[in-house]
């Protein structure tokens, strides 16, 4: 997944504790555009701590607070909650190029 890519949310499930850390949440079935891909932190409610290592997406139109130090990254959403949407116009353009190359 890359910046500018369209994705659809396939998992919006969340515990009340984690949801309380966000000002805005995602909705299953909704299409979003990736604003940035970052290394985020994962919150563990059992230990009330954060650990690094989760690939997170920041989405256009959704702004959330930052995680506490030392991570201090904006709160994003785990990339596993999304699936890419194929851009049909791009696929069609590539197919036309391949057909033109084959005819030449």
Image: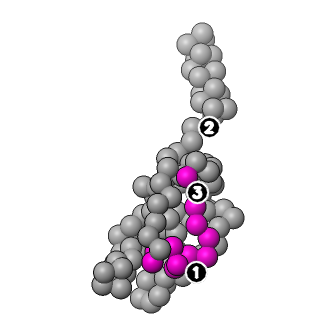
Q: Which mark is residue 27?
A: 3
> Is residue 18 part of the magenta span, yes or no?
yes
- Measured as percent of width and height from the top left, residue 81 is found at 46, 55
From the viewer's perspective, tell me whether residue 64 is left or right of residue 11. Answer: right
In the foreground, 4 or 23? 23
Q: Residue at x 57, y 42 (%)?
A: 85
- Measured as percent of width and height from the top left, residue 6 is found at 61, 48
Q: Which mark is residue 65?
A: 1
| Above or below: residue 76 compared with residue 73 | above
| Nearest to N terminus: mark 3 or mark 2 | 3
Q: Name the main secondary structure of what is drawn in magenta.
A: loop
Question: Would you identify the image quadrant in which residue 17 lies?
Answer: bottom left
In the foreground, 27 or 93? 27
> Is residue 30 part of the magenta span, yes or no?
no
Question: Would you identify the image quadrant in which residue 55 lies?
Answer: bottom left
In the foreground, 19 or 89? 19
| Nearest to N terminus: mark 1 or mark 3 | 3
Question: In the picture, which quadrant includes the C terminus?
Answer: top right
| 1 or 3: mark nearer the eye | 3
* Pointer 3 local density, CA inside 10 Å: few below 14, some 14–19, many at least 20: some
Q: Which mark is residue 32?
A: none
Looking at this view, name the residue that lies furthest to the left.
47
- Measured as percent of width and height from the top left, residue 37 is found at 51, 63
Q: Which mark is residue 87?
A: 2
Alpha carbons under labels 3 and 2: distance apart: 21 Å
Tell me where the magenta segment starts and ends, as one range: 17-28
From the viewer's perspective, tell me whether residue 91 is left or right of residue 68. Answer: right
């Amino acid at each position: 997944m890359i910046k500018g890519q369209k994705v659809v949310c396939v998992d919006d499930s969340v515990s009340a504790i984690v949801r309380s850390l966000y000002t805005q949440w995602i909705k299953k079935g909704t299409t979003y555009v990736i604003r940035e891909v970052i290394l985020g932190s994962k919150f563990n409610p059992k230990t009330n701590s954060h650990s690094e290592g989760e690939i997170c997406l920041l989405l256009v139109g959704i702004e959330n607070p930052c995680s506490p130090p030392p991570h201090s990254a904006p709160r994003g959403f785990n990339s596993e909650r999304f699936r890419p949407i194929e851009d049909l116009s791009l696929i069609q353009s590539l197919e036309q190029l391949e057909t033109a190359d084959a005819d030449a």
